[in-house]
Image (spheres, rainbow, N blue to C red):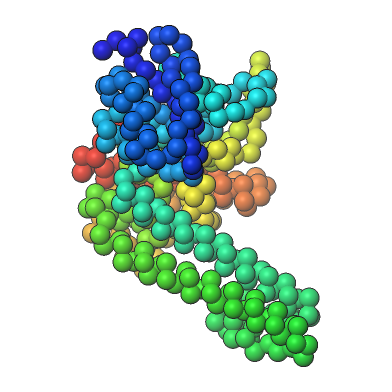
Amino acid sequence: MGKDSTRFVGMDVHARSITIAVADGDGVRSVGVIPNRPDTLRRIMKRLGPPATLRTCYEAGPCGYGIHRELVAMGIHCDVIAPTLIPRKPGDRVKTDRRDAEHLARCYRSGDLTPIWIPGPDHEALRDLLRAREAAKKDQLRARHRLQKFLLRQGRRTPEGMTNWTQKHVDWVRRQDFEHPAHRATFQDYMHEVDHAMDRISRLEAAIDEVLPSLPPEVAAVVAGLQALRGVAQLTATTIVAEVGPFSRFAHPRKFMGYSGTVSSEHSSGGSTWRGPITKAGNSHLRRVVVEAAWQYQHAPALSRRLRRRQEGLDDEVKEIAWKAQCRLSARYRKLTAKGKPQQKAVTAVARELLGFIWSIGTHIERKRRVLPAAA
């Protein structure tokens, strides 16, 4: 089927409406606005032509992948587009739903859009659960900060030698008492929020433990393999796999690093080259857990009892990659800090290289299990 017979459909999707535009041999035109309902979507697609002649797309956003799955079930090709990689004209200051849909259709026809990887329903459910725990951890941090600042305003400082939020510190906080009724009410409310956040995290972690045994064997193998790396325990490994999906969709580790947003920004012109902070134009959840794991590489290479336990039963090549990561990344951290680099910058550089080792282990296990999707 020739390209001239193909209709490229751009959709600007909102919670209650979908604005549709079509690009084909006759140009780009707006089709109109329909309610965001499966029955209405099916009817408009039947009007636009046979499923084999349609290629549809819409931006990734809060509406999720329901439209993608509905169209694929109809036999229509559908891509979900990365919003940050859609070309924009610097001088274009008019933004409407109709213009956005037409712009999507036009760029889709010219091949200028970058589709994202679509997780399956089970994979998406696991990702949502892990992100719920991450949100709970952030809420816990805010609740603890509010309580600590309140105590500090009342002159209640943590005793010397006591680490914040250990069991000993929590017991000390609970023993605090205040004469003024308003202060007592404030303290009780802040303490209740801290306790609520702790209970919430415990419930979510218990739910994660219940879900993990039901993972597909190929996914469980990658989760187990990543735990051979220092700083990557079960929760971190599961988060990485849930956010990334198949590692083999990245043809090279540099693309994987770019996906995480840990590569340096750059502005080069003529003979000058300027590199700045990391782009952060990628998966923030992946970037967060990898940077947390990278802090472990400030220590000298070693195999702790816990790490040995995680490596039991793993492939020898996976263990070799993990040990190579320890030696290289520990030396990298020491070299950068010896040059006077701040710890945070050194750890970020280590995290970027750690992603390469994560990619290497992931693709090695997927090759062994013949999980080889097309490269991104």
Quadrant for the C terminus in the image: top left
Residue 356 sits in which quadrant?
top left
The residue sitting at 36% across, 64% down in the picture is 208
Q: Which residue is painted at 71% across and 85% down in the image?
A: 184
Residue 210 pos. (x, y %): 31, 66
State the residue at coordinates (65%, 46%): 341
Eyeballing the image, is 156 above or below 11? below
Q: Position of residue 83 (x, y in %)?
A: 51, 33
Image-based side of 244 in relation to 287, left or right: left
Return the x and y of residue 195 as percentages of the image width and height. 55, 77
Residue 305 % position (x, y) = 36, 68
Does residue 46 appear to the left or right of 347 in the view shown?
A: left
35 vs 199, nearest the viewer = 35
Kindly tell me whether residue 373 is visible in this rendering.
Answer: no
Within the image, what quadrant is residue 125 found in? bottom left
Nearest to the observer: residue 307 or residue 372: 372
Image check: 112 left or right of 234? right
* Residue 4 in view, yes or no: yes
Q: Nearer the viewer, residue 192 or 239?
A: 192
Identify the residue at image location x=37%, y=34%.
Answer: 41
In the rendered image, the quadrant that contains the N terminus is top left
* Number of marks in the rendered image: 0
In the displayed structure, does residue 317 sit left or right of residue 79? left
Q: Is residue 115 above or below residue 143?
A: above
Does residue 256 lie above or below 87 as drawn?
Answer: below
